[in-house]
Amino acid sequence: MLYCKPKISFNTQVLTMKKQTLKIMLLAAVVSLGFFSCKRSSSNNTSRATGWRIDGKDGGFAANTKYKDQETAPGLVFVEGGTFTMGKTQDDPMHDWNNTPNQQHVQSFYMDETEVTNLMYTEYLYWTKTVFPPEDPSYRNIYTGVLPDTLVWRDRLGFNETMTTNYLRHPGYAEYPVVGVNWIQAVQFCQWRTDRVNEAVLEREGYIAKGVKTDSIDSGSTFSTEAYLTRPSETYGGKIDEYKGRIAEKSNRKSKKESDDDAADGEDAEDSNVYAKRTSGIILPEYRLPTEAEWEYAAKGLDGLREYNNVRGRKKYPWKGEFTRSGNRKRRGDQLANFKQGKGDYGGIAGWSDDGADITARVKSYPPNDFGLYDMAGNVAEWVADVYRPIVDDEASDFNYYRGNVYMKNKINSEGTVEIVQADSIKYDTLANGRIMARNLPGQLAQVPVDENETYLRTNFDKSDNRNYRDGDVASSRYYDLFSEDDDEAELSKKRMYNAPKHEVGSDSTGMIRQYDKSEERTTLIDDNVRVYKGGSWKDRAYWIDPAQRRAFPEYMATSYIGFRCAMSRVGSKAQNNKRPRK
């Protein structure tokens, strides 16, 4: 027994050691296999179409395989899209048939947290005046065209001259919403903002050198996002090589290591690497005016009333409840928006104001709605992108509804390349009220309407201008004999559902000539240049601060109670938090 014990113990120890070694080897193999499999499966650099490597060091197809999510641009907040009831959902004592309920769906988008302020707009004025000095006769109409109309404050029986001289520029009003801006000016501000924001993004990412956007710009070397994406070498008036940032420096250092032949062969590849493209994922979509559907959806702030796929209850205002005063214990009795309380009551009794303002109020003076948006009721009404018609044609569209599409394309010059606007090719428009505004600016791409090359055999659109589609054009008029053989083109043009006045503006050696249309045959004020504005203002009663309300005003006119805010489309996923549907 004493002899056998060591033998059994020795064999057992050996067997145990072998088992442990085998386990360690198996574990190492499993871990290695798992690591290899995970690394292989998680790689985004191999094409699932061809098996080729993407973004390889040896060249070939390049794509941004590390893209995560759209960056939230300056001033914006995210609004997750969805389905909602557009139009009046509460009692309508006026029985106004132009906002009857209809169900719409909007995609996710971004919207300005507040209305565009005087400070934001004067930055635009400063840039315009610096780049296109009005003392130069070639650019005088550019600067005067973007100036707000400060005379909107005047009243025949009111003393408001202080606002005409101070409201836009005095620092006391810096964070107040800008007014006196017509619809066209608001659209041009959005275009300018797009270019300035993307210029800053390119500087941050190293595609252009630091300081270029402020130090080296004049009227002949401006930056345009679309021009940069289409013809980057012509950006900044063709001076882009002087303004390239660290991305270009890295590319140049790399090219010096190559042979002369390889460098010559790779010139195009190098150029493609030093310019950002849409595929780079850093260029932001354009700032723009929100559509009417987007604005109303965002204003209602239904986020706090959602339960699964339903909305619990109906909201009359951007906040919860049926009243304009707060029920919160700390703010009980306070007005939740800046609007006219009653006849002669714009702000309440001195010392105990109902809403804290008599004209406009500083932005963020009132609590935000569920999306985090301020002043979606009251303060100033806001321009939206849509052309006005009394009905929202949900039979034609219930997805991203918008009336006002005018499809354009890039103009091709005699050399077969896209044409970039130069100082001597600026186009100006004379508006119906005689105001002259630049249609395009140097550095931007020249645009022309789409033609039959784009519309041939298409079913989704067949012309450039779709503002009066299904409503107001000849095809939708009320005349049963519309296509009678006896009618010529001149007669057909008279048979229109919307027969608005047509004022004419011209000029001669004596100056501007304005001719008013005094015809008694006109039937309406509606035409393709009348735009929707939403939300009540400091001059409006509570009836108008319901987000469902809609009114219209000519796009070339401005008031003391209409402002605007910008929006931006979202690209990619619908939600920011990658949520999954419940199963």
Image: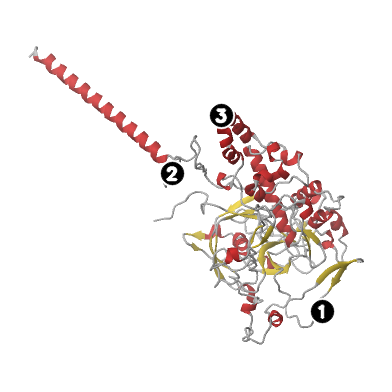
Q: Please give the residue where the numbered disc 3 appears in the rendered image.
A: 259
Q: Secondary structure at mark 2?
A: loop
**Where residue 191 sits in the image (x, y, percent)?**
69, 53
Q: Which residue is at the front of the view, 315 or 418?
A: 418
Q: Is residue 155 left or right of residue 6?
A: right
Specify few, some or many for label 1: CA neighbours under 10 Å numbering under 14, 14-19, or 20 or more: few
Q: Which residue is at the front of the view, 265 or 506?
A: 265
Q: Residue at coordinates 43% horizontally, 44% vertically from top-left?
A: 47
Nearer the observer, disc 2 or disc 1? 2
Q: Residue at coordinates 63% horizontally, 50% vertically from top-left?
A: 76
Specify few, some or many for label 2: CA neighbours under 10 Å numbering under 14, 14-19, or 20 or more: few
Kind of residue sitting beneath label 3: Ser
Going from N to C along the chain, the mark reached first, 1 or 3, is 3
Q: Are marks 3 and 2 in contact (CB under 8 Å)?
A: no
**Which of the 4 image quadrants contains residue 269?**
top right
Q: Which mark is residue 47?
A: 2
Q: Is residue 146 left or right of residue 18?
A: right
Going from N to C along the chain, the mark reached first, 3 or 2, is 2
